[in-house]
Image (cartoon, grey):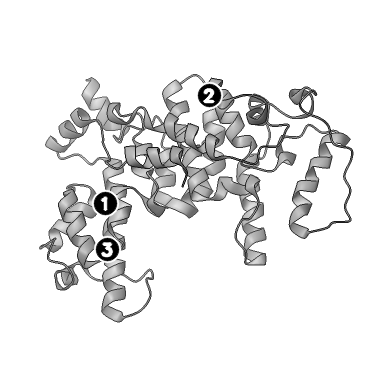
Amino acid sequence: MNTAMKSVHLMLLHFNFSKTGVDMARKKGQLIELEKIRGAKWVDLCLRVASAKATGKDLSSEKLSQCKMIQFTKAVDSPDLWSKYKLGYAQPEVTTVKAVQFDLPGTAEIWLMGPYGLPLWTVLAGNAKENSHVPSKLLDAELHDEVRRPLWSLLARNAFSSMSLLEKVQALLEVSVSPSVWSRPSAVTRSFDEWEREDAEDESYVGAPEIDFRFAPRDKHFLTLQELVQKTPNVFAESYAYDSQKVRKSKHRFGRAEKRVFEPKRLLAIIAVVVLLARDKTNAEILTYIVNGIRQAVSDQFGRDVAAYISAENNDFDGLLPEIKAEKSN
């Protein structure tokens, strides 16, 4: 992990909601949606690890009963408390999470950070006051990490540090899916389908002459972000469906850099984009298109509950349900 990404991970070690809104909601006995998702994933993992420990089998979807958890960890001494954690009505202290980790190794990370050790919870509450800097820093870190930048991409032509939000969004998405998605319908840009042929190791294939995009106008040959989101069906959803089928048939992982939209780390950066666009409130069409395009990928990588959360109407990504915010404003 490079220095830029390390700094982001250290910065995100503690997960924060907007304290005032959450405290008000808790006093009324209301459910904070993101706490529910986070709690459910932590408890489910603890039950699965305990089940594996009980049976001596590898970790699977099989879960131990909450009533039997006391046999494996005394850090949580009540089945009812496990239920409260799972439903989001209570949150374990960090000391409790670490104590459970001692008895059930591998369970703390999903609570403290998120699935795959990625800071999912902080990003999903990225518009809470305490977390407002997180999505943009994570997006910048992901752009900084991208080393293979095709000459036609916006990222290759401009320093990302000087880009506007929409330019950063476009630059990230350019290097996340196949160039053929962005190509205008012309014989020259179709030659970029040769990228797809690299997987087949067809060394005999020779495409059309390359264009030197250091001098050629990029937008003459490739779509802008605003143009891309007019395409139907949704290019991100379609790409994911196609490549998922391809991977299942070949029994190999996604291998090309441009397919990284389907890997957890890249997907989290795109979720950060969703959070930033929701904050910006001036690009609803682009926001909706991206959310619809990544919904299935998010469901597969992080769970249906997370996919439903990012797709929720009027979600401000501060961790609160819309009806809680409505009550606060009355």
Residue position marked by numbered label 1 in the rendering:
39
Q: Which mark is residue 161?
A: 2
Horizontal and vertical percent for residue 145? 54, 40
Secondary structure of the residue carrying numbered label 1: helix
Q: Which mark is residue 46?
A: 3
Residue, far left? 77
Is 203 or 80 nearer to us in this picture?
203
Residue 255 is drawn in which quadrant?
bottom right
Labels 1, 3: front one: 3
Rendered position, 178 above or below 275 = below
Labels 1, 2: front one: 2
Q: Decide: few, some or many residues near mark 3? Use Cα within 10 Å; few <14, some 14-19, many ≥20.
A: many
Residue at figure coordinates x 62%, y 52% from the top left: 241
Q: Are marks 1 and 3 in contact (CB under 8 Å)?
A: no
* Residue 203 horizontal side relative to residue 172, left or right: right
* Residue 87 horizontal side relative to residue 294, left or right: left
| Amino acid type at mark 2 | Ser
Horizontal and vertical percent for residue 131? 32, 31
